[in-house]
Image (tube, rainbow, N blue to C red):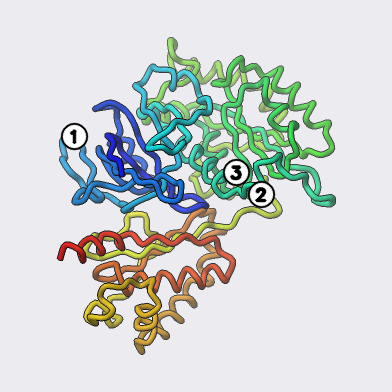
Amino acid sequence: MEEIHATCVALPSPAGPLGMLLLGAAAAGKSDLALRVVDAGGWLVADDRVRLEVRDGTLHAAPLPGFEGLVALRGLGLVQVARLDSAPVALAVHLEAPGGPAEQEPLPAERSETIAGVEVPALTLDPASASAVPRLRLALGARAAALARPPEAEAPRAVREPGEGPLPVVLVTGLSGAGRTTALKILEDMGYEAIDNLPLNLLSRAVTEGELGRAVAIGADVRNRNFAAGPLIEQLERLRTDPALQVSLLFVDCENEVLQRRFTETRRRHPLAEERPLADGIAAERRLLAPLRERADVIIDTSAMALPEFRRSLAERLALATGPRMGVFVASFSFRAGLPREADLVFDVRFLRNPHYDPALRPLTGKDSAVADYVAEDAAFAPFFQSLTALLQPLLPRYEAEGKSYLTIAVGCTGGRHRSVATAEKLGHWLSRLGWPVSLVHRDLERSRDAERTA
């Protein structure tokens, strides 16, 4: 076991919660970025000091005893936030002050480094950037896909089967601040492979080289190197001549006044307004992108559009015939440690009889069959579970239809060790049988074990 100076946070992914080590000097912004990740639906694993342990070749991070879920914030001290007791480390993120190379280079070069004897993918990020958390999500999504890929899939992607039709390719562009990055995230949730800020000279190669088997969405705007509408249109037209591809150009638009308000509220710099008024930068970008807007297959104006409406609009126009289903996270927890902030639905099972008071069952957990049987034999359990599943079965498709990529169902009991764990396990198995992608997380199980050992 090794201990390092870092902060570790985790985000949900199709492969389950994956951790990221935030590395940097004191006052680099680790805790602040961690708070933003938690606010975006993630979890804190450890702040300032992280314990690292290698299990089956995978690096796992955990907090120091007594500091679970605590983040140090200037002016506030130690604050309790949503947490995980441990997480596999999928990324090492080096935080760099604004103005450094991370801010100048929108697509960091792929690299890795060795931490505690394990090779971990690494990237450099400006923590003050408004897009820092979305960039972490994109990077973690790519890492989750790599982890989920079987070893034999390291070869080129499989050719689409005959009769499946041409491969959907969406080029996403539009005005800065209109929602282009959000559109890419939504398309990724819909099943597209999302690539942002790809150098234009690599556009055709990214789409045509190799044996493609997955729809792809590529972001391009004025931040791209050597951006010009003419060459981009030429590449787009060349791709359209390929009968194996179904190429669409999506343009995300917005009214000038709304764009000015968004940039002013977020205090972000417009990429073309560094040395000129914001209105001039927006006008210059609109002129630069006008030829692309004229060629666009889909134009979406986000001026008065809320996120759910934006998501529905994209789904109506660019949905794949078959896309990934909504991921369902089932989490057990202890009410003593507080409600999980990320939970969408919370169920209390403290009305069930408690195995804690049976000396033979107390050392066990809800993952043990003896405890699971004890909980299930409670006369109140069967009608409760039947009502719970009857409630969830029609709800989940509706949540998916509303555009949710992940749904978190939390089940709580007093200690987070017996009843909630057994119920969460049974619920997870039931959801899996229905075909939902399920991840199980027992938030306070390790904490309860530590308390048992020290009691």
Against 209, is 439 above or below?
below
Tell me which amino acid carries mark 1: Arg
The percent coordinates of residue 218 (x first, y second) are: 63, 33
Tell me which amino acid carries mark 2: Ala
Q: Going by the image, does 137 lie left or right of 445?
A: right
Q: CA distance from mark 2 to mark 1?
A: 44 Å
Q: Going by the image, does 370 lie left or right of 207?
A: left
Q: CA distance from mark 2 to mark 3?
A: 8 Å
The percent coordinates of residue 183 (x first, y second) are: 56, 39
Which quarter of the picture shows residue 99?
Answer: top left
Tell me which amino acid carries mark 3: Leu
Of labels 2 and 3, earlier in sequence is 3
Against 24, is 357 above or below?
below
Give the residue pinned by disc 3. Answer: 187
Q: Going by the image, does 34 lie left or right of 135?
A: left
Of labels 2 and 1, earlier in sequence is 1
Residue placed most toward the observer, 132 or 151: 151
The percent coordinates of residue 223 (x first, y second) are: 54, 21
